Image (cartoon, rainbow, N blue to C red):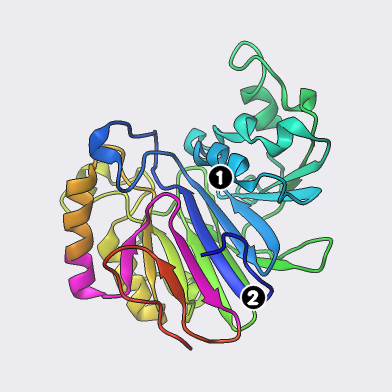
Amino acid sequence: MSRVATSDELQVRFWGIRGSTCASGPQFVEFGGHTACVEIRCGERLFIVDAGTGIAALGSALGDDVPDTIDILLSHLHLDHVGGLPFFKPALTKERLVRTYCGNLDGDSAMDSLDKLFSPPLFPVRLSQFPAQFEHVGFRAGETLTFDDGASVETHSLNHPGGATGYRFRHGCRSVCYISDIEHSEPWPDEALADFVRGTDLMIYDGMFSEAEYPRCRGWGHSTWRKGVELAGAAGVKALAIFHLYPGHDDAYIRALEAEMQSVMPTAFVARERQSVTLDASGGEAVADWPRTAKVPAV
């Protein structure tokens, strides 16, 4: 499968799928260990969602296929979503513009927060010292982002400590929603969120905890695969990718979880690093690069 989408494709590729911190060891090989980063291509138009440690591998894989302006949409600024930013190779090797977008700071950008994080004594190099120019855009979750080339991305506020932002990408007749980090509400599904993701072809959803673990972790800002399936069912979501995996859940655990989930929703799967989903924007059959899961249904 070609990594770069054509103008008729909406393509998703997972580069980091863990939450909180990385997972490492032979028992974490199948699903991967890097923190949140997803590449989304609307045709040839590149978006990057979150800048966890997975963004380093994405940067290396892009090679020369890098636009002069790179848009990084941040769900929020917790370390597992921004910690990989200084290791993003395209920002280190050539003068270009890297824009970050942050929607959970009441309209403020991520500039002050990132400047504090990536500076001595916490980090030896400031972003302002990189070959790339960094520009930071603030907005309020719920607004629609419009970019210089006319592309647009819808956003939605998520229930998470300090706030977080969900995104909806559209290309042709296809769409993908990124819903991480979120804690499900009572009652559930949330009507406004269901309206936001309604009918999407693929919803990437925070399934960090099991149902048994969740009561001990209430208030931490995360959810479960069952709540993702419930939201998908209520909103007519065609396929579900469970994401933001707990770093203590190894391959055997997640494999069993996936099998149980697919017995309820056959088009659900657990995201794996470097896994791709390609959606034909004209409405044809989806091509999915993942094991033992059903194809995303055609429109």
Determine crowd level at label 1: few under 14, some 14-19, many 20+ residues with C-alpha closer than 10 A: many
Secondary structure beneath label 1: loop
Residue at horizontal 47%, vertical 81%?
199
Q: Label 1 is placed on what type of residue?
A: His
* Residue linked to disc 2: 171
* Residue linked to disc 1: 76
Q: Is residue 97 left or right of residue 47?
A: right
Seen from the viewer's position, the closer of residues 27 and 170 is 27
Residue 180 picture location, percent across and down:
46, 54
Q: Label 2 is placed on what type of residue?
A: His
What stretch of residues is rendered in magenta?
Answer: 260-281
In the rendered image, the vertical position of residue 226 relative to residue 119, given as above or below: below
Q: Is residue 272 magenta?
A: yes
Inspect this view and state whether residue 80 appears. yes
Residue 156 picture location, percent across and down:
57, 63
Q: Nearer the viewer, mark 1 or mark 2?
A: 2
Residue 39 picture location, percent across and down:
57, 55
Q: Is residue 240 left or right of residue 75?
A: left
Inspect this view and state whether residue 186 appears. no
Q: Is residue 184 magenta?
A: no
